[in-house]
Amino acid sequence: MENGIERRPANFIEEFVEQDLASGRFDHVHTRFPPEPNGYLHIGHCKALCVDFGIAEKFGGKCNLRFDDTNPTKEETAFVEGIQADIEWLGYKWDKLYFASDFFDRLYEIARDMIRRGVAYVDDQTPEQMRLNRGTLTKPGVNSPYRDRSVEENLDLFERMKNGEFEEGTRVLRAKIDMANPNVLLRDPAMYRINRHSHHRTGDKWCIYPMYDFQHPVQDAIEGITHSLCSLEYEIHRPLYDWFVAHAGVTDRPPRQIEFARLNIERTVMSKRHLRRMVEEGVVSGWDDPRMPTLVGMRRRGYPAAAIHDFMGRVGVAKADSTVEGSLLDHCVREALADTAPRAMAVINPVKVVLTNWPEDKIDVLTIENHPDHPEFGTREVKFGRELYIEAEDFMEEPVKKFFRMAPGKEVRLKGAYIVKCEDFVKDADGNIVELHCTVDMDSRSGSEGANRKVKGTLHWVSALDAVPAEYRLYEPILAEDEPETNAVVVDEDGNEVDAAPADFMDRINPNSLVVKQGFCESWIAAHDVGATFQFLRMGYFCKDKDSTEAHPVFNRTVPLKDSWSKEMKK
């Protein structure tokens, strides 16, 4: 304990940084968060985001935001804007904002200088020839027949590549390292390739673009980054990272790359490429579909930023990959919303209740608190009359043991109102119960002297006098079952995600990931702005969706009330 605050032990990244500062390797801390703008950030990126910004924050340093926009094929300005909004939503502030495209001219000159120094060359081999000549883990690669071109020829060909004289796939610029190196990534990796797609910022100025493994470390060095923090799949790239920093010649204090385990959550798609496919094939409505693990989707679903920070703190930073239970994230959301979300009543699967002994013209106005633990949230007035709605699941024609809700001849209390007893019910032609006939104990009004009579069940309800029709969207995990290897991600030499498992994750899409219900809610709820979050009594936490209209609000269930994580913690 220090000043009454419990200090958590430093994670291994913090220990490395502390060592670097103590040894004099660095006298300050400067990190960066470098997303590619080809999609929106998801909860997996959020771990890297929190690590990058968090380390800088802890050591009084700085963190840059850099968009590694070196592949124009799928990069868009909309993703740039969305990523910035996500970072601001989480409460982080970057020091400098950079784009890799800001440095294209300088990277080109650095590549030319490497050609002059004999550590880069233009290769005319086809992609297939280069793949075959790269070798295997047990067999060394074969030198390209173009590896020993003169400096002058390489400079001329590289300039002509830049000028657009060659077609895509006909030539690349490669680093001259060692085709027999045990690390396959060091076998003369590509530095530049021809790509004729228009860039979201530079337009058609360039038709060659730097490869990730060249651009990323060199730009770290240019920006003066001290610690390059990245996920574990880049560990094998570290020698190549160090090689490019050393041979670029832009710093005498090279950054230190430190890898940590990526975040995997059960039954959650964590590959940006797979998420893009779900969007493009219409599995979800868009990147902000509340079933998506994107931050924009989570925000739409009603997740508070505080819950994301709490979740990341509980997961921690580790050196080995693991899969986290989704119930932990749900628990963090409930913890964050418990004190901030007003209580309200909504019926998702309604059945009508008629109070047969209640006068038709009688209206009682009840005062109900908006939060049991926060009187400052105030109260609201709710009309109570002859007709109302309850959940269909709260009635059972032939009740099982310990069913304390409504049944023929049984009494229950309506929350904040009266005790009622079911006398009869009505079924439709299909045998579904559509209406309950009940009597009300007029002396049992909550807060009155007669309210002391106890009954075992208490139900939420909505008055037909001011009920507003509403849509409720209930969500489950997007994957029907968990297979951790499907969530694994492998990164190729371009920094692109490639499949680690042959199984098609689309075969495991949960058909019940979205269930839509039509019910009713209190009128005061419908008047709130989009994004407002409530705890609907006994039903869960819900957030008002952007699809709402004035006459028909739509609510996304953020999380149900059931908290299996807390129960597991108590065992």
Image: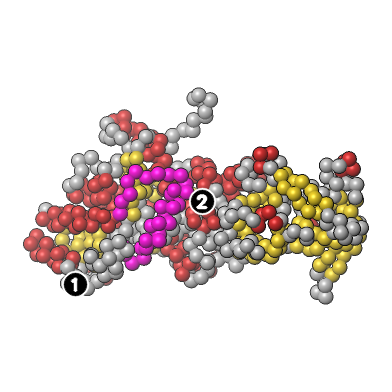
- Picture residue at 50% right of the left edge, 41% below the top: 313
Q: Which residues are magenta?
A: 71-99
Along the line of sight, which residue is nearer the eye, 338 or 325? 338
Along the line of sight, which residue is nearer the eye, 507 or 27? 27
**Figure check: 55 above or below 360:** above
Asked if the magenta segment contains residue 72, the reply would be: yes
Q: Residue furthest bottom?
A: 429
**Figure check: 35 above or below 335:** below
**Disc ID at residue 166:** 1
Q: Tell me whether the residue at label 2 lies in contact with that at label 1, contact meaning CB atoms closer than 8 angstroms.
A: no
Q: Amino acid at mark 1?
A: Phe
Residue 502 in view in this figure: yes
**Disc ID at residue 323:** 2
Asked if the magenta segment contains residue 263, the reply would be: no
Along the line of sight, which residue is nearer the eye, 51 or 286? 286
Q: Position of residue 111 (x, y in %)?
A: 18, 56
